[in-house]
Image (cartoon, helix red, strand yellow):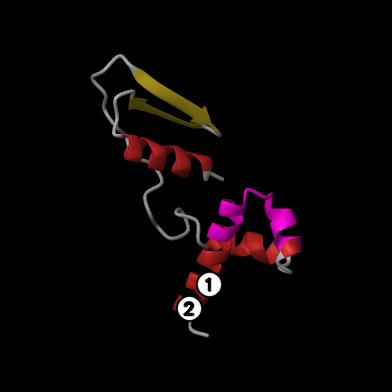
Amino acid sequence: MSQTAKHLEWQSHLEAQRASGLPAKRWCQQNHIHPSTFQYWKDKLSPQALGKASFTELSLNCSDTISLQTRGVHIRIRADCNQKLRKQLFNLFAELP
């Protein structure tokens, strides 16, 4: 199996685990995947490991904002932000390691 195919396969596994709502350990048990292998690929395919930007600063001029903070990351978005964009931001925020 090519490296690209393996990356795609594991990206699919990672997305399936997130979509399941199950903790990684339980998802791995149900899918017969060793937890350390799962964690290896999760780390390997993380945005930081792939060299993707993991931080984007937004400037806001509106006092009505939504603010989220966890694991040392803080984001603020305008309350009237496009709903689709807001949902994408919340989903990305929820995926932070």
Identify the element where label 1 is drawn. helix
Q: Nearer the viewer, residue 69 or 94?
A: 94
- What residue lies at 68% left-to-right and 54% top-to-bottom? 24
Give the extent of the magenta segment: 15-29
Amino acid type, callout 2: Ala
* Residue closest to the eye, 56 or 19: 19
Q: Which residue is mark 2?
A: 5
Where does residue 49 sit, x and y in percent of width and height? 47, 58
Answer whether labels 1 and 2 touch (C-beta < 8 Å).
Answer: yes
- In the displayed structure, 16 sits above or below 94; it is below
Q: Residue at x 34, y 27 (%)?
A: 77
The residue to which callout 1 is attached is: 9
Asked whether residue 17 is drawn in magenta, I would say: yes
Residue 22's spot in the image, x, y percent? 67, 50
Q: Mark 1 to mark 2: distance in Å? A: 6 Å
Q: Main secondary structure of the magenta part?
A: helix
On the image, the x and y values in percent for residue 62 come to 26, 18
Badge 1: few (under 14), some or many (20 or more) residues near its Cα, within 10 Å? Answer: few
Q: Is residue 21 above or below residue 27?
A: above
**Residue at the location (48% across, 83% down)?**
2
Magenta stretch encompasses residue 72: no
Residue at 53 percent across and 85 percent down: it is 1
